[in-house]
Amino acid sequence: MVAQGIVAGRRRAGDTMPSSQGFAAHLGSRSITVALAYGNVVSSDHLSVRGRTGHYVLTEAPRALKVPQAPLRGEAGNFTTLTAAKWRRLARLSKPDDWERYPVPFPYGQADASLFDHQNWRHCALCALDKRDFVALTSDCYGIAVDATT
């Protein structure tokens, strides 16, 4: 929440952050929780620490990008109206009604369920979502040589 407030501009460069104890009392949490959160925000280059005076918002802290909104043409909120001209220029795909009976049908954008390896796909998904492999999947491997034969 602290980092989001800084990025959104609710805190300006040089602003002093509340003390850990005062902020914890305001949030109804423990001061150690706020101190740890401040530590994370310091490490992400949003805050600086000045000994015995507190935490301050850095002048170089990330800010939200201000993207100008382009005026809508046509009816606002009507997706069909806004995109109709774009899709009208595309050639229509056509296929025979009995395309599935062809020896090699080559359907556009459709997977052949009989050729898809569902068992290995399920295994990969389970491994990717398993807590015990989370550290291996998310650890920093920059600069580590990887043996492609394994």
Image: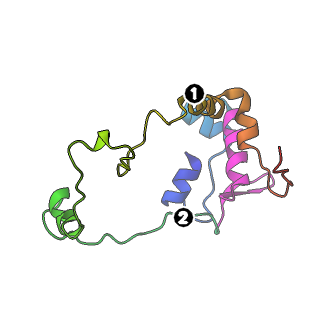
The residue at 65%/68% (across/down) is 60
Residue 38 image point, x, y percent: 68, 46
Residue 42 image point, x, y percent: 71, 53
Which quarter of the image is occupied by the C terminus? top right
Which residue is identified by label 1?
119
Q: Element at badge 2?
A: loop
Q: Element at badge 1?
A: helix
The type of residue carrying mark 2 is Arg
Q: Which residues are magenta?
A: 32-58
The residue at 36%/72% (across/down) is 68
| Residue sitting nearer the eye, 22 or 149 | 149
Which quarter of the image is occupied by the N terminus? top right
Depth check, mark 1 against mark 2: the one in front is 1
Residue 27 image point, x, y percent: 55, 34
User: On the rendered structure, is 115 left or right of 19?
Assistant: left
| Residue sitting nearer the eye, 62 or 51 | 62
The type of residue carrying mark 1 is Gln
Which residue is identified by label 2?
63
Write down the quadrant of residue 25 in the picture: top right
Above or below 49: residue 110: above
On the question of residue 77 being in view, the answer is no
Above or below 5: residue 81: below
